[in-house]
Image: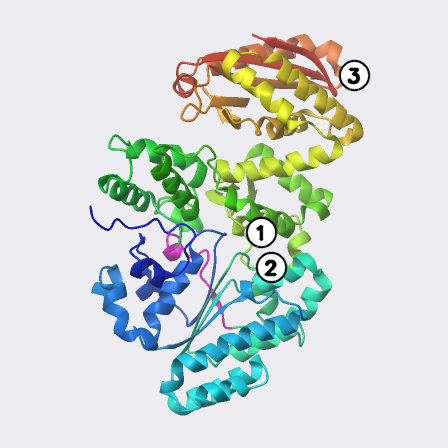
Amino acid sequence: MENVKRVPYGVSNFVEVVEQNQYYVDKTMYLPLLEQQPSNLFFIRPRRFGKSIFLSMLRAYYDIAHKDKFEARFGKLWIGQHPTPLQGTFQVVFLDFSRASGGSGSLAENFNRYCGMAMDLFGRIYESFYFPGFAQKMEEQPDFVSKLNYLNFHAAETGAHLYLIIDEYDNFTNVVLNEQGNEIYHALTHASGFYREIFKKFKGMFERIFMTGVSPVTLDDLTSGFNIGWNISTDYQFNMMLGFSETDVREMFLYYKEAGQLPADTDIDAMIAEIKPWYDNYCFAEESLTRDPKMFNCDMVLYYLRNYMNLGKSPKEMIDPNTRTDYNKMKKLIQLDRLDGDRKGVLRRITEEGEIVTNLTITFPAAEIANPEIFPSLLFYYGMLTITATRGNYVVLSIPNNNVRKQYYDFLLEEYQEKKYINLNHLGLMYYDMAYDGQWRETFEFIAHAYKENSSVRSMIEGERNIQGFFTAYLSTNAYYLTAPEVELNHGYCDMFLMPDLLRYDVKHSYILELKYLSSKDFEAKAEAQWQDAVEQIHRYAEGTRVRQLIKDTQLHCIVMQFRGWELARLEEV
């Protein structure tokens, strides 16, 4: 196949993708649907879900300055056969607020400078629709608000149709919230704060507005100044507008296989089965639970595909290392270092149970981030939780996949490591011995000892749930297994199943771990009965057909650990 399309990993410019022969997953069928909505729209999605390239496509479609390029850019896409009357009818003001927070000046100066430059560019692009010298006059306006007023006056005079597109509308305020604190954020977004005043200017000036971001925090704080926005983030009609469906992924993988970019014997089904537990399972609307397939994180899929094409096999690291910056941003936004007991409790509960039942709050002010009841909704918008079920008028929000689960484990791990540092390299060598030689005792004793050391620093973390959280956090650093807490095996839930990652490693041994806890005062009276129950439980799990399927030809070890308070009292393979 000649001119094989390039994988657009990390590319967010639609024009670049279509004009430089890169692979594009068509999302243009959503344009007519968006036109039927109210004129001013907000759309929230987690990072790396394709927001920027979608906005770039939107801009290319509606921009009157590029009307003559419609056929070349959109001819092979869905909208090319079904254009709407609004195609190529707008002058587009495009702002990316992630670029508005840097610089040497004050917050207001940096913001004003960036937005002013965007307006100057607008003046140069659309001068021919106004009068000679329009662009120069735009540049002479002293600030962003003056430039907006100047445009508003002349657009009305000429009958121009204006479309405002804002990428990462909340980025600027999230940076402020992180680095400057709540008081400065409040001053920006309330009363006569400059950010709020800007949004008031937008109202009534633009025929259409489309904004995206990663959280609805700013949205709530701005709404009394900008009270015309319609939030479509949890509308089932747009559940699949961003991200990849399994069909999208299958078609893409097949394209590259047929183009000779993947080995001839590549099993597409096996590839999809491999990435599903890592990148799939996102659902953003309650009504979509029964009508839509789950969605993949598109950047992660492209990362995997690119590596597979280069190596002829899946990447050693299933999590894209470039997302570490996202993780750090997430950590700051979640404000882990400043989490109070209640929110820490929410985070730990989600990590250990994998889900939480809650009301999904559509928007909330920044002041409410500290509210433990709001916190799960914030995690949902960041992509750290997804809708998996309903319970009456509540939703069940769950950890979507292994990629995100690893981030939760890292939150816990960081907390434990701060209390009592453990050498993870040393632990990693023990995991190798576990996986290949079946030498498990030293590893579990090592983690049990670390638990005792950690617990003695903070006596309040004693208890069976906290033992499980501790073991989960440290076992998650193990490369050879997918650490799955509370897996349903043969009509029951085991505490921990170390599922061998046989796609990447030739592991010889697998493990089911049952953790049992008794307080010191109850231990003598109840220990033996508890032990016998644990042995019966773990044998029942081990006999399940699902376990046999998952462990393949590895040797299964059933390990029971019994704790007396912080102390490991008994450890045996049964």
Near-viewer residue (497 or 110): 110
Provide the secondary structure element on which disc 2 rests.
loop
Provide the secondary structure element on which disc 3 rests.
helix
Q: Quadrant of the C terminus?
A: top right
In the image, residue 219 lies at what x, y percent? 56, 64
Magenta stretch: includes residue 235: yes
Residue that numbered label 1 is attached to: 378
Kind of residue at badge 1: Leu
Q: Residues within 10 Å of mark 2 (few under 14, many from 20)?
A: some
Separation of residues labelled 2 and 1 (CA atoms): 9 Å
Question: In the rendered structure, which disc, 2 or 1, sits on the residue that comes first in sequence?
Answer: 2
Residue that numbered label 3 is attached to: 521
Question: In the rendered structure, which disc, 3 or 1, sits on the residue that comes first in sequence?
Answer: 1
In the image, residue 263 lies at what x, y percent? 28, 33
Q: Residues within 10 Å of mark 3 (few under 14, many from 20)?
A: few
Is mark 2 in CB contact (under 8 Å) with mark 1? Answer: yes
Kind of residue at badge 2: Phe
Separation of residues labelled 2 and 3 (CA atoms): 46 Å
Q: Identify the magenta region.
A: 228-241
| Mark sitting on residue 364 | 2
Near-viewer residue (359 or 351): 351
Provide the secondary structure element on which disc 1 rests.
helix
Q: Main secondary structure of the magenta part?
A: loop
In the image, residue 465 lies at what x, y percent? 65, 28
